[in-house]
Amino acid sequence: MRGGTTTAIDSRYAHRPVMVAEVVEHLSAVPSGVFLDATIGGGGHARALLNARPDLSLVGLDRDPSAVEAASTGLADRGTTICQACFSQLGEVLDGLGVSELAGSLFDFGVSSPQIDQPQRGFSYRKDGPLDMRMDPSQQLSADEVVNGWPEAELLRILRDYGDERYARRIASAIVAARPIASTAALAAVAREAIPAPARRRGGHPAKRAFQAVRIAVNDELSQIEPALEAAIDRTAPGGRGVVLSYHSGEDRIAKHVLRRRAGLNDESRFRGLPRSPSQAPPVIELVPRGSRRPSPAELADNPRASSARFRGFCKLGDDQCKLGDDQAEGAA
Ligand SMILES: C[S@@+](CC[C@H](N)C(=O)[O-])C[C@H]1O[C@@H](n2cnc3c(N)ncnc32)[C@H](O)[C@@H]1O
């Protein structure tokens, strides 16, 4: 299988999964059992993994009911269980299904192509639509409230922290001055006009980072990552494996921190040649690879939406399947 292969399992929900070959290569070594896809989306990664490992049972989660419907249809022949839930609820969902141990897990953060490509979902800075951006349309908070209701200081914070936006102050103040902002096209125009003209031509669409910031705020995306990863690691069987795909520095920073801590690599005493600090829990996972991986140049050329992807993987300790022999670290970033 090649990284750039399209795996649209439901033609109405066409999402091109990222780093499929790398994900399947890492996860096909899991023991038999239940595999958790915590962000099932269109089910492309799940199908590729089940093709390689038809013996696995799959539980899929997504907070977006249209993703749940697409994955349920697309994977109907595989006897999977797909639930509408946030990945922060994974403990509850697995308990409800009587699953106490996982063979492995996958977290593929962020948005799917159908969410971005349907203007009525309000995620797109290229197509006009309502200010929505809710992954779960039954949720109360929408982009309209963030853009038209949040104080300027909060807008500044999210533009900086979630958008890595250099012109956060200018954009936050332009948004407040332009209120009420009625649509995604209007928000994109406000963000664009707030950025100095020479800078608009650099770094992709000028409204890209502002939209990312509002989307992460609306869906409260970052706060869910740590508890969900912890719960997945805790439930993973010895020799089981996990993959985390991040698309934003904030997501990757949290994933890296959790994985390194559970691998016993955040203990300062190690670097000073001291015995392990008593407060440091013993390692329960090994990082495989030790750092992160990026999509291949071929995949990047073929799928621009993969451009910011970072792959991190782990293997649960306690079994001889857990080796660093297949470590393909590209630096320990
Ligand atoms: C990049 S897509 C996943 C694509 C999927 N791997 C595939 O192959 O089609 C991310 C998905 O995760 C979902 N999602 C994002 N945050 C979530 C969360 N906290 N809980 C559950 N689902 C989430 C989104 O609704 C979206 O469908």
Image: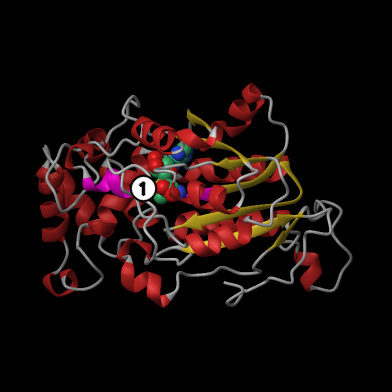
Residue 155 in view in this figure: no
At which x and y percent is residue 314?
67, 58
Residue span colored magenta: 107-117
The C terminus lies in quadrant = bottom right
Determine whether, in the image, residue 51 is placed left or right of residue 76.
Answer: right
At which x and y percent is residue 306?
38, 63
Report the front residue among 77 and 280: 77
At which x and y percent is residue 233?
68, 46
Disc 1 under 8 Å from ligand 1? The reply is yes
Under mark 1, the amino acid is Val
Q: Look at the image and say whether residue 40 sits in the magenta stretch.
A: no
Is disc 1 placed on a helix, strand or loop?
A: loop
Report the front residue among 42 and 133: 42
Quarter residue 34 falls in: top right
Residue 41 in view in this figure: yes
Q: Which residue is depicted at the point 23% across and 34% down?
A: 149
Q: Look at the image and say whether residue 111 sits in the magenta stretch.
A: yes
Report the front residue among 187 and 287: 287
**From the viewer's perspective, is residue 98 above or below residue 213?**
above
Q: Which residue is depicted at the point 55% across and 31% down?
A: 89
Residue that numbered label 1 is attached to: 111
